[in-house]
Amino acid sequence: MNFDVAQHEDETGIELTPLIDVVFLLLIFFMISTTFTKETSLRINLPEASGEEAVNQPRTIEVHVGAGSEYAVAVGDGVARALVNSNRETLLRALSKFPSANSDLLLVIRADKEATHESVIKVLDVAQEIGMSNITFATKRSTD
């Protein structure tokens, strides 16, 4: 009889294969769930306040932004003509009719207090694209 029992020594060690699999799964998860956005900036020349009224009033273009993100453009005469739709291209065509190289041209944005931030930024973006640098916002004086 052979009573020689083969002794098997268990090798204790750390298996790296499952750990590597988990690390790769985490890497793939973060690569897929990450979004990359390109941040843009708008250059706005804000008007300086002074005690005197300007002698030469600049020619103004007013862009009215409604509560439902609809646009209207008024030039000098004060009559706002509503745009057909609120697409960016329509706004770009409406504002590009005016010579942006003219330094005395002032763009006034009259936004409803319920207008979305996106619709106001769209006006600023279009103005920057066509080269308008004199931009201001119209507000109502608060009655305390």
Image (cartoon, rainbow, N blue to C red):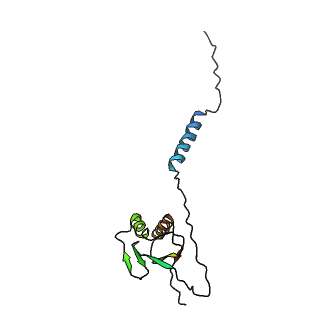
| Residue at x-position 43% and y-position 70% | 95
The answer to whether one can see residue 102 in this image is: yes
| Residue at x-position 58% and y-position 72% | 45
Q: Is residue 1 above or below residue 107?
A: above
Farthest residue to the left: give it.
Answer: 84
- Residue 13: percent from the left, percent from the top? 65, 31
Q: Is residue 101 above or below residue 56?
A: above
Farthest residue to the bottom: give it.
Answer: 144
Residue 1: image quadrant is: top right
- Residue 91: percent from the left, percent from the top? 41, 68
- Residue 117: percent from the left, percent from the top? 48, 70
Which quadrant of the rendered structure holds the C terminus? bottom right
Q: Is residue 40 above or below residue 13?
A: below
Residue 88: image quadrant is: bottom left
Pick the residue in front: 16 or 140.
140
Pick the residue in front: 75 or 91.
75
